[in-house]
Image: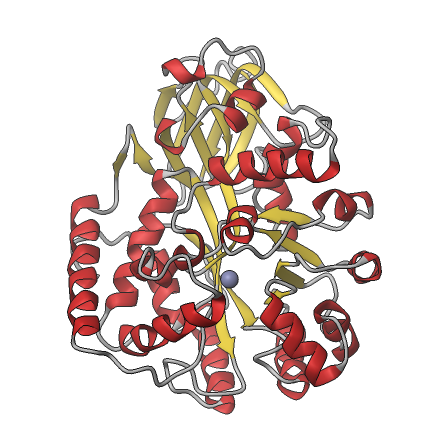
Amino acid sequence: MRDSVRHEDFDTMTSTLLTHALVLTSESSRPRIDDGAVLVRGGVVEAVGTTAELRGMSAERTVDIDGHILLPGFVNTHTHLAGTITRGLVEDVTTGAYLERIWPIEAMGISNGWFAAGERLGIVEHLMAGITTANDMFFDPASALNNAVDLGFRLLAGTVHLDFPGPDNLSPSQRMDEAASLLARFGDHPLVRVTAAPHGGYTVGPEQLESVWNHAHDNGLLFHIHAAESSEEDAAIRDAYGRRPVEHLGAVGVLDARTILAHAVRLDDSDIELLAQTGTAVAHCPISNLKTASGVCRVGDMLDKSVRVGLGTDGGTASNDYDMFAVMRTAAILAKNATRSPERFTAEEMLRMATLGGAEALGVGHLIGSIEEGKQADLVVVDTSASHNVPMFDPFTTLVYQAGRTDVTLTMVQGEILMERRRLTRVDLDSVVNDAISAGREITVELSNGAEARVSPSQ
Ligand SMILES: [Zn+2]
């Protein structure tokens, strides 16, 4: 990868001691530690406690957090990183009109490097915003996984299955080959994870859904699929199968604890019951849902039934940016309004949903999502000194309702500091931005030359 430093030989015994922090752990037995400290060694949290409790422990580097907030990195449970490069291109139209405009661009984007530029731009935007993990869905997932490894970002991504050729022009059987090759290349990787990512119940028929499901089941993969999002999807599945979208996926037999549904907006009570019974998780993307006028996800009803729910931004083309502060705030306000109850949800509950809740929804809650001994050291520092963050009576409230992504001053993934004082450590931000600007200019030229639609949707 150009303009970046390779860290093939990451020193797994590197250690860092973070001291004098207001630690919000997302762990229920000790959610808040005043004047807290965290010792990180070999990419893992070795000790958590007060600064006094950890006195005497030594590390190669000590960082004084000076009373600011230290929390687990945010977990983005649904996105399309490559689509970062086409954000803002098509706005204020129906899904059908949107697809008509975006298809020709997606067809060209893989071969000429635009999407790789979008992946890198999306990843650095995540890191600058304190997001340390994302669950991606886009064509050529090997490219996204390679870029994630290169930039030190924790990414889950897998083959996007469709019944028809997509922008990458692959047949269903070629997609299964791609899925096998991803496993061979990244199956044992310590940072990134391979998933199965069939696009949706209206773009993938029952037969293929079943074979992808078997592949996911045989290899222990997350099964990531769009479901119950748009009225077009709802109508297509009702027409074809006489069922609601979630009911259909249940009937095909692809709902269980390894499944995460992106959006899950159009649900009735029996759908929520089905999610609860099967242990299916949901990626709640409130800003995307509001912007595309899809509706409101019934998060409260799901949590009442113990359905695992994480938060997501969705891709750049649907909701433009990757800002989990904005997503948390929107999710909280939306839930309060939808339930006519200001008690639902507390800021502490929202922060948990944006961190450990997301990790649990992705099936990696045992590895990431909270600051606990033995877990991966994916950590973020939020500076609380800006005018909009003071006075601070409750740090959870400050984070959810006042703080913003530019307040993030440190992002660590697997023990490695990837951003410190708003500067990336592995890659030159300007080079990533300039590559994206160049790709944007090329897209503009192609559009003015009258690019023709010839493929099918990806989002
Ligand atoms: Zn999506």
Point out residue 338 in the picture as x, y percentages from the top left corner: 70, 40
Is residue 173 toward the left or the right of residue 207 in the image?
Answer: left
In the image, taking residue 58 as reference, residue 230 lies left or right, namely right
259 relative to 4, above or below: below
Q: Nearer the viewer, residue 459 or 419?
A: 459
User: Residue 436, position in %: x, y?
Assistant: 21, 56
Residue at x-position 59% and y-position 33%: 351
Quarter of the view holding residue 198: bottom right
**x, y percentage for residue 275?**
77, 59
Tell whether 342 sits left or right of 200.
right
Dividing the picture into quarters, in which one does residue 261 lie? bottom right
Count of marks placed on residues: 0
- Foreground: 16 or 280? 280
* Residue drawn 70% across the image and 27% down it: 342
Colour scheme of this structure image?
Answer: secondary structure
Q: Nearer the viewer, residue 60 or 95?
A: 95
Q: Is residue 113 positioned above or below 358 on the image?
A: below
Q: Where is residue 206, by image quadrant?
A: bottom right
| Rendered-image quadrant of the N terminus | bottom left
- Image point (36%, 57%), residue name: 148
150 above or below 345?
below
Residue 122: x and y, percent? 34, 53
Residue 224 visible in the current orientation:
no
At x 74%, y 37%, the residue is 339
Q: Is residue 7 in view?
A: yes
